[in-house]
Image (cartoon, rainbow, N blue to C red):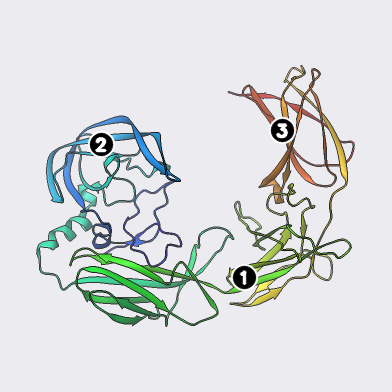
Amino acid sequence: MPRRLLSCAFAAMTILVLPARDAAACFCGGLATPCASLWGRDRAPVLFEGTVQSIETRVLDEVMDVGGTSRVRQREMREVRFRDVRPLLGRRVTTVLTGTGGGDCGYARFVVGERFVVHGTDERVGLTTGTCSFTAPVAEAREILDYVAGLSAPSAGARIDGTVVLAKREHIGLPSISTTPLPGVTLQLEGPARGSAVSDAQGRYSFAPLPAGRYEVTIVTDRDDLVKAGPLRQSVELAHVHACATPYAEFFANGTVTGTVVDVDGRPVSAAQVSLRAADIEGQEYYEYDTTSTDADGRYRFQSLGEGRYAVGVNLERGMRTTSPWMPAMATDERGAPAVVTLAHAALVEVAPIVVRAPASAMVTGRLVRADGQPVANARVRATSAGERYRQFGDGVDATTGDDGRFSFALGAGAAYRIGTWLDTGSAEMDAVVVDGMHVTLVLTPRR
C-alpha cells in the first residue's frame, strides 16, 4: 500500500491523518494511510462518491477564538454540489466546501461533470475537504476505495506501526529535512492492551493486533546523546478495529556550540544577538539561522545540533538593532579568518570569543526624486540595518523629505543598510555600506 508524505513537523508520536496530494504551497508532511486518515479524529468520517454538479464561490464569516475572544473573519471558499451521490462512509451529503487551492490547502481539481471520491471533515463552516485529504477523481482513488471495500470483512484488529528517526536540520531554523532510522529505541504501550517494542534497523516498530480504544505510547530511553523533539508520551486513538496509527518520533543529536561575546576591551557583552547557520552556504539560494542572546556574563549556547559545519556570529541574521547595537561580527580562528565550527555527533564545542564593537556615527544625506528629476516632498525614507548578503533586515531609522526632496540619517559607519521608500505611487531602494558623508539619490519608480 503506498504511503504519502504528511504534515506534522515536530509533533512526534501523534496520529497523522492527512495524506498529501498536489500540495504546492500547502505543506501536508508525515506518513498516513486510509486506516489512519479516516479514523484519526473524534468525529465520524464522511466519504462519498459523486458527480460534480456545480461549483460556486462563497464568502463565509468564520468565527475564531483568539485568546478567549471570538473574532469573525471573512473567508472565500468554493461550494461544490454533487449529484448521483453514493455514500461510502458516514452520513449522506451532497455539498462540500473547499478553499481555492494553493496556500489555503483547498482542493482545486474539481471539474463540473466529472466523478470524484470525496473525503470530508466536519469543521465550523460545514463539511470541508482539501489538498491534504483522500479526495481524488474516481480513477485515482483505488487505495481508499479498496480500503473501504474491505471494512465489511473481519479484522484481526487495529494496528500501531510507528517509526523512530534521527533528524538533522540541514538549514538551521527550519523543520528537519534529513532523517536516518534510529534502531534500538524501546517503546511501551498502555491502554486496552499492553506491550513493548523496540525499533528495528529501519527505525520501525509495531503493536498489533489491538482492540479499538485510546492508547498511550511512551518512549523509554536514557541516551544522553539524543534530544527528543516533542513529548516522550503521546496519546493514540484507534477508533475502529480497522483503524491504524502511524506515529512518527523524531530525535535530534545532542550537539552543543557555546561561547562568549566580548567588546574590544575584553568585557562581556550581554543581550547581543548571536546567530548560527550552516557554514557551507555557497550556491544556496535560501538558508536560515538559529538565534539566541547572550546572558549577563556574555555567554551563549546552541543545543540540539547534528554533526556538521557551522558559522557563528553576532547580528549576522538581521544586522544591528536597538537591543543589540553592535556591528555584525563572526567568530574568527587564530589567523583572524571566519571560524568554522566542526561538530561531531553529540559533541560540545567552545568557540573562540566573538569580539564586537559599536559603530561610529556616520551622517548620510540623500535626495528623493521622480524619474523626471522633480523632488518628492514629505515622503518617509527608511534606512534598515542589513544582515549577511542583505537577506534579512533589522531595525530601521526614518527620515522625512523636505520640499526639495532632501533627507538625512545618522547611521553606523561601515554597516550595511537598505535605504528606500515605499509609497502608494511608487518605490525606490538601494543597498549600501555606509561611510560618513555619503550622499545617495533615490529615483522613484512608479507602480504599475
The answer to which quarter of the image holds residue 95 is top left
Question: Which of the pair 171/1 is nearer the observer?
Answer: 171
- Name the residue at 14% across, 70% down: 155
Dot 1 corresponds to which residue?
308
Quickly name the residue at label 3. Answer: 420
Q: How many badges with numbers are in the image?
A: 3
Q: Within 10 Å of the Cα at label 2, are there few (<14), some (14-19), or many (20+) other Cα atoms?
A: some
Q: For residue 111, which numbered disc appears in the image?
A: 2
> Picture coordinates of residue 142 (x, y %)?
20, 55
- Residue 391 placement, left or right of 17: right
Q: Which of the two discs, 1 and 2, labels the residue nearer the N terminus?
A: 2
Which structural element holds mark 2?
loop
Q: Position of residue 186 (x, y in %)?
A: 39, 81
Foreground mark, 1 or 2?
1
For the residues labelled 1 and 3, the Cα–Cα distance comes to 38 Å
| Near-viewer residue (88 or 357) | 357
Q: Nearer the viewer, mark 3 or mark 2?
A: 3
Amino acid type of the residue that numbered disc 2 sits on in the rendered structure: Val
